[in-house]
Image (cartoon, rainbow, N blue to C red):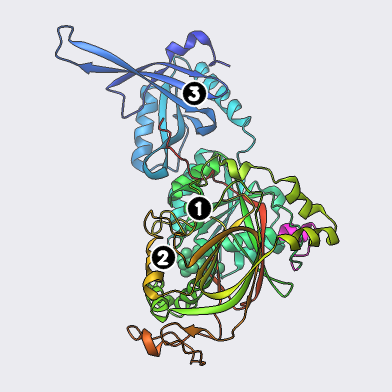
Amino acid sequence: MTGPAEDTKSQLTLLSSKLLHQHQAVEAALNRHVFVWKEIEEKSQKRSSGISKTSRSHIVQVSEIVGIHKVEDEDHTKSKWDQKKTLQFSQLFPNAFTVFYVKRTKNHRWRCNEATFSCSSAELCEQWIQVTREQLSLLTNRPKRLLVYINPFGGKRRGKRIYEEKVAPVFQQAGISADVIVTERANHARDHLTTEANLQQYDGVVCVGGDGMFSEILHGLVARTQNDNKVDQNRPDAELKPCMLRIGIIPAGSTDCICFATVGTNDPVTSALHIIIGDSQPMDVCSVHHNDVFLRYSVSLLGYGFYGDVLADSEKKRWLGPARYDLSGVKAFLCHNYYKGTVSFLPAEDNLGHPRDKLQCRFGCSICQHKQSSKDKLRETADEETAAEVSSSSWKVICGKFIAINAANMSCACPRSPKGLSPSAHLADGTADLILVRKCSRLDFFRHLLRHTNTDDQFDHSFVEVHRVRKFHFEPLDPQPLLLENQSELPKKPGFCPLGSAQTTCIPSAAHSSWNCDGEILHHAAIQVSVHRQLIRLFARGIEEQQQRV
Ligand SMILES: Nc1ncnc2c1ncn2[C@@H]1O[C@H](COP(=O)(O)OP(=O)(O)OP(=O)(O)O)[C@@H](O)[C@H]1O
């Protein structure tokens, strides 16, 4: 499809306020997929000819157009100064319209750019707007109505402001309506989603906050979906129903790892634009059970030992803010506890990838799109007896002394650890990377930790092993954490060791470590974990490999 009329293309003049005096656009054309315009840049050159002209084409995917508006349309989202400018502008060019579109900038950040065109008549202007809107309405993946939860206390307590100043204006430009709930207590959003919210009227749920807030939305939405479909979450072998509504994350917390791993940056405007254009990123979810009782869901990290101890200690120091993680990290490192236990796991034999390959999960990831093999499907569809046979032959068991047991459901990349705990873990392949860090010296453990911050292979140590798994269980063997340095296995008092006195006076925190489940503490050491493939979808697309600049 071409623009409103072939012969009228030349009547459109690009009037982007920035470019007005330098450029003259001679053409704008719309077809089913792209909106193209051509600029002519006038350059003064000291040539005999005086002025020379160069032309540049702009191509915007229709799918990345945020909205189109007549210039005179009142826009209360703009500042008074901008509104005044718009008024003057519309008096000069009465038949102008503006196209708002996604512009890629540095480090995976997106911005909402605009280009304004003037038409020779009001009729032509209306025609352009109508035709463009018709094209946009064909994009059925775009949300029209959203349910937004804002945690006013997340991060630096700027969630409400971030939403009002950076997100609501772009939603308005895109014609999205949003019902906003500012949470009044912890678990408000989770409970509202599970029991009250009328989800049929929405196309997605958005959380404004950090990973803790995302976890609330995850639990609310998954629980609601299972309740509606009469699936018992307490059964570890239950086949959970995927959630129909997508989740959007506007980062406004002190830890925004899920947003970073799925978008590539923690930037509210970028996230809002991914929501507007209706991106969809499936994600695996781990269910965690203890003795056939459901405990929690996890999408990023389940960590026992080191990461469990760090979290348990940091919770006592919330008043310190984000610095508490550093302090507790140093303390846990100096304590250098290890824990005895048995890990049994079901390896993902048919999976294309391996935790040590270099295939990072990126936009359009082929491994996440790979269908499960028939053998793997058999495990799911076989009757209990056959399933047990197939499974029991595949389960592997490892007993040992571990400093850390980590299950990464995604790379867990964050600004501090750009490649994450498991750089090649995938968002939606139905597996988790199980990383076992066995008892080793403090120096070796330090070398291992250091690799989270650089590009060296973090699994290339004799005391570290990694397996890509679909399920795993952990059973602690020894009720007491042990000290490596003096090999004492005597019970110690609770609490962490004082700084600098790790060798002989380190005090274990408890009889055993606890699990760090996406930043929440689980007090049961014995757990059963299953990965549920693509249980949820986010308004995201995964990290784009190469930024396509338009
Ligand atoms: N109105 C509220 N009052 C108190 N707590 C809330 C409220 N709304 C949400 N919460 C809780 O606050 C916790 C932290 O929120 P969030 O993840 O948004 O911020 P954060 O600063 O990244 O968190 P953290 O302190 O875990 O780093 C969440 O677990 C959530 O359950």
> For residue 332, what is the image quadrant?
bottom left
Label 2 near ligand 1 (CB < 8 Å): no
Q: Which one is in front, 527 or 447?
A: 447
Label 2 or label 1, whichever comes before in sequence order: 1
Q: Residue 304: horizontal and vertical position, in percent?
A: 54, 72
| Front one among 149 and 50 | 50
Q: Which of marks 3 and 1 is nearer the N terminus?
A: 3
Left or right, 528 with reference to 442: right
Q: Residues within 10 Å of mark 3 (few under 14, many from 20)?
A: many
Question: Looking at the picture, which amino acid does disc 2 mark?
Answer: His
Q: Which quadrant is home to the N terminus?
A: top right
Q: Check if mark 2's residue and mark 1's residue have beta carbons within 8 Å.
A: no
Q: Pointer 1: what residue?
A: 356
Marks 3 & 1, CB-CB < 8 Å contact: no
Q: Tell me the number on the disc at residue 437.
A: none
Q: What secondary structure is marked by label 3?
A: strand
Marks 3 and 2, how far apart at CA: 50 Å
Q: What stretch is highlighted in magenta?
A: 224-234
Q: What residue type is labelled 1?
A: Arg
When the figure is inspected, residue 284 is found, relative to residue 151, above or below; the finding is above
- Name the element at disc 1: loop
**x%, y% of residue 295?**
66, 71
Instruction: Please say whether residue 198 is one of the residues in the magenta stretch.
Output: no
Q: Which of marks 3 and 2 is nearer the N terminus?
A: 3
Q: In percent of the image, x 53 and y 79: which residue is there?
A: 339
The label on residue 35 is 3
Query: Does dot 2 land on a helix, a strand or a loop?
Result: helix
List the residue tagged with mark 2.
Answer: 448
Other residues around mark 2 within 10 Å, as few (<14) / some (14–19) / many (≥20): many
Q: Does the magenta portion include 232?
A: yes
Determine whether 160 is above or below 38 in the image: below
Residue 157 % position (x, y): 43, 64
